[in-house]
Image (spheres, grey):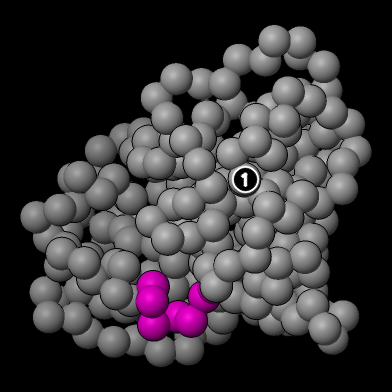
Amino acid sequence: MAADGQSGQVKPYVICHMLSSVDGRIDGEALRTVMLSGDYEATGAMLGGNAWICGRTTMQQHFAEAEPFISATGKPAGPQSVHVARRAESYAISVDTVGKLRWAGGDLDGDHLICVLSERVPEDYLSMLRERRISYVVAGAASVDLAEALDRLGEHFGIRTLLLEGGGHINGAFLEAGLVDEVSLLLVPGIDGRPGIPTVFDGVSLKLGAAVPLKLKSVERRANDGLWIRYQVAQP
């Protein structure tokens, strides 16, 4: 259900929005010659999300400071209340289990930054976030509890539609947890073919045992012979 902090339906509607080669690889640099410049971002804007979320690796590559955070004490923070540094029209959300990413401030290209962390995060990492006016959600003891985190994001920040734009492993974690409602895939006219390149969904455990069923919503041909495909994730 779409998040609505006033109605009690707090989980955001999650759309995994990705760009990939025909064989499912997501190395943007390798695909640059076969993709339309700005097409991924423009298409994402059409999905109506008021937040986007990525994992630590993607955030480190594109947004966080180069040097990681090193705790002076290493003392775990344990359970914490949600910290709302400010409210905004749109949010950028980072999943960073133990607080490795260092941030210059709470603004990412006009989106307010929210860090999603586990209870293993050091106390002084949270202090750093508060000093830099960065919001945070602590959910899960040993690792991030994604379902709990989503509920808190909906309840405290009013996030209704969340674009999941991570690497294959965080996308796979959301899928495995049953939290992906829709897949929005920009399929570009190219084949990568290299082994070991991340794919749209990676790292899903064997316990799923079968492909996750999808229901086609729409297909649109793009000017570069690519396709924009939207699928609803079938509910069990």
Residue 91 percent across, percent down from the top left: 55, 62
Residue 36 percent across, percent down from the top left: 15, 67
Q: Does the magenta stretch include residue 45?
A: yes
Magenta stretch: helix, strand or loop mostly: loop
The residue located at (11%, 74%) in the rendering is 224
Q: In which quarter of the image is the C terminus?
A: bottom right
In this picture, is 14 found above or below 47?
A: above
Q: Is residue 69 magenta?
A: no
Magenta stretch: give its range.
Answer: 44-50
Circle count: 1
* Residue placed under numbered mark 1 in the picture: 133
Residue 234 percent across, percent down from the top left: 65, 79
The residue located at (79%, 77%) in the rendering is 5
Residue 124 relative to residue 219: left or right: right
Q: How crowded is mark 1: few (under 14 residues within 10 Å), some or many (20 or more)?
A: some
Residue 187 relative to residue 114: left or right: left
Q: What residue type is labelled 1?
A: Arg
Residue 170 percent across, percent down from the top left: 57, 47
